[in-house]
Amino acid sequence: MLIIAGLGNPGGKYAGNRHNIGFMAVDAIHRRHNFSPWSKKFKAEIAEGEIAGEKVLLIKPQTYMNLSGEAVGEAMRFYKLQPADLVAIYDELDLPSGKARLKTGGGHGGHNGIKSLDAHCGKDYRRLRLGIGHPGVKELVQHHVLGDFAKADQAWLEPLLDALADNADMLVRKEDSQLMNKLALAVGGKAEEEKPKSEKKPAAKSHIHQARNHNQPKLPATGPMAEMLKKMFGSKGD
């Protein structure tokens, strides 16, 4: 089983907040695939279903963001799952709006929901960060995060969530780079091309180093050429 946990705050007051993009993401997956209706268990709203032939549990912790790990950790213990069986989806201030990044493990970056998950679930789970942009000033961060998405944000938010739902099978199969390309293209970005492996070239050396290491041609010691060189440059004893 794979748990896909979307992070956010419960209640209508927070439903449209940037901080709730994790809830929005799992809601989109729930709508697109064959899942049970939402029910309450593990201090969370959960729904069971199947994607790409694997059983999936969607979970939206109802403990408020800062205690997200309590709900997710309880579900993991119940099903005897490991951190590798968890994907967390959440907002990321340090990514431009609409950008997405997916990796296993790492730091919490100051995100209280991730701090809680790390404490209750271990750290080696997959983290899908969805960029909400930064207001530019530290004092405005809380207002930005707990503020609703603007109408203009829908131009990238809806395509991003739709693409994630459409390609949730890639998330389940751990086709992370392919999924990132799909999400990038959905919001008008470019797919990340795999760079061809090039042959290693020897490290570049300075001109002086090269000159010192190359065999220098021997100058004639006798004859007309030697006499001419002596007149031009003088002998070493001069």
Image (spheres, rainbow, N blue to C red):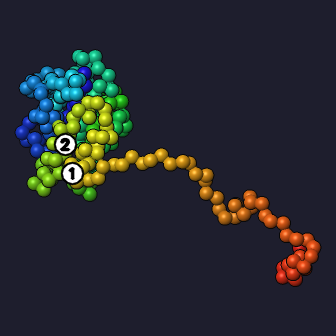
SS type, badge 2:
helix
Q: Residue at x 14, y 47 (%)?
A: 158
Residue 233 percent coordinates (x, y):
84, 79
**Three-letter amino acid code at disc 1?**
Val
Q: Is residue 223 above or below residue 114?
A: below
Q: Work out which quarter of the rendered image holds the N terminus and state it.
A: top left
Where is residue 121 drawn, in percent x and y? 30, 26
Which residue of the protein is positioned furthest toward the front in this rendering? 224
Residue extending furthest toward the bottom:
231
Q: In the rendered image of this protein, does residue 100 appear above or below residue 234?
A: above
- Residue at x-position 36% and y-position 30%: 124
- Where is the C terminus found, in terms of image quarters? bottom right
Which label number is shown at residue 102? none
The alpha-carbon separation of the residues under discs 1 and 2 comes to 9 Å
Is mark 1 in CB contact (under 8 Å) with mark 2? Answer: yes
Mark 2 neighbour density, 10 Å: few (under 14) some (14–19) many (20 or more): many
Q: Residue at x 87, y 77 (%)?
A: 225
Q: Which residue is mark 1?
A: 187
Left or right? Give the position of 107 relative to 23.
Answer: right
Give the image quarter of residue 90. top left
The foreground one among 126 and 133 is 126
Residue type marked 2:
Ala
How far across and how far down the image is residue 86, in percent?
28, 28
| Figure disc tally | 2
The residue at which mark 2 appears reads as 163
